[in-house]
Amino acid sequence: MPRQVDYYFSLQSPWAYIGHNLFREIVSTYGLAVNHKPVVLVDLFSETGGLPLLKRHPVRQRYRMVELQRWRDKRGLQFHLQPANWPFNARLADGVVIAAIEAGHDPDRFLRRAYAAVWEEELNLTDAATLVKLADDCGLPGKPLVERSGSEEISVVYEQNRQDALAADVFGSPVYVLDGEVFWGQDRIELLADALKSGRAPYRSQP
């Protein structure tokens, strides 16, 4: 059986977008099975001691902008540092990912398309019609998936992902969890690849 990695993220996370292509290369290289777990970031931050962007000290906000530019160059991407329709409530967009998985679809093409829609094209992912078109563009049944996304059943899964994140010591986006070992941030992807290449046992927090 393939090794599994839990992928915690939100479509509003610039870091999940920046790391996604490299993450998928590693998934392909090592034949990983990905458990996609979209998660609401505001709640996760507050419950684990983090702060939403606008509540962070200006020094941290300024440094974040520098880091975005560094990693934009490092990953060979072209995107807006402050896209027109960001930040946004990602519940509906993240829910489309959950609905796609529920219907038996691989969500990766939609994720790639949706990340680019936010950060490169400055589209509004709170708009249902926009999400329908993005899903349709990926060969997915956009209208039923978007309609399903807003359901209570999808909200239950979204909440369960939050609880799973807390139980797994996840506190941001993106996070990749391999055999219980947490790799937080797209700048840890190379460390994830190292762990897979070496086949080492997972590291644990020391008491």
Image (tube, grey):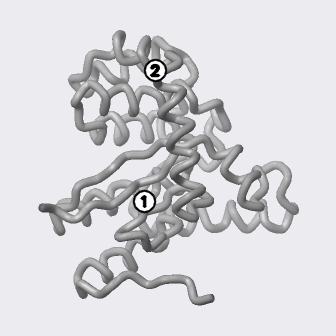
Residue depicted at x 66% and y 44%: 82
Instruction: Give the amino acid type for the residue marked by disc 2 in the picture.
Output: Ser
Query: Tag 2, which secondary structure?
Result: helix
Corner quadrant of residue 68 = bottom right
Q: Position of residue 130 (x, y in %)?
A: 46, 18
**Mark closest to the chain's N terminus, 2 or 1:** 1
Residue depicted at x 70% and y 44%: 42
35 or 118, nearer to the observer: 35
- Is 59 located above or below residue 199 in the figure? above
- Is 133 located above or below residue 14 in the figure? above
Corner quadrant of residue 31 = bottom left
Residue depicted at x 54% and y 43%: 39
Q: Position of residue 69 (x, y in %)?
A: 58, 63
Instruction: Give the amino acid type for the residue marked by disc 1 in the picture.
Output: Gly
9 or 81, nearer to the observer: 9
Query: Label 2, on which residue?
Result: 149
Q: Residue furthest front?
A: 207
- In the image, taking residue 25 as reference, residue 60 lies left or right, namely right
- In the image, taking residue 7 as reference, residue 124 lies left or right, namely right
- Is 58 located above or below residue 142 in the figure? below
- In the image, taking residue 29 as reference, residue 19 lies left or right, namely right
Counting other residues with Cα less than 10 Å from the Cα at mark 2, is it few (<14), some (14-19), or many (20 or more)?
A: many
Residue 94 is tagged as: none
Residue 19 is tagged as: 1
- In this rendering, which labeled residue sits more in front, label 2 or label 1? 2
Query: Tag 1, which secondary structure?
Result: helix
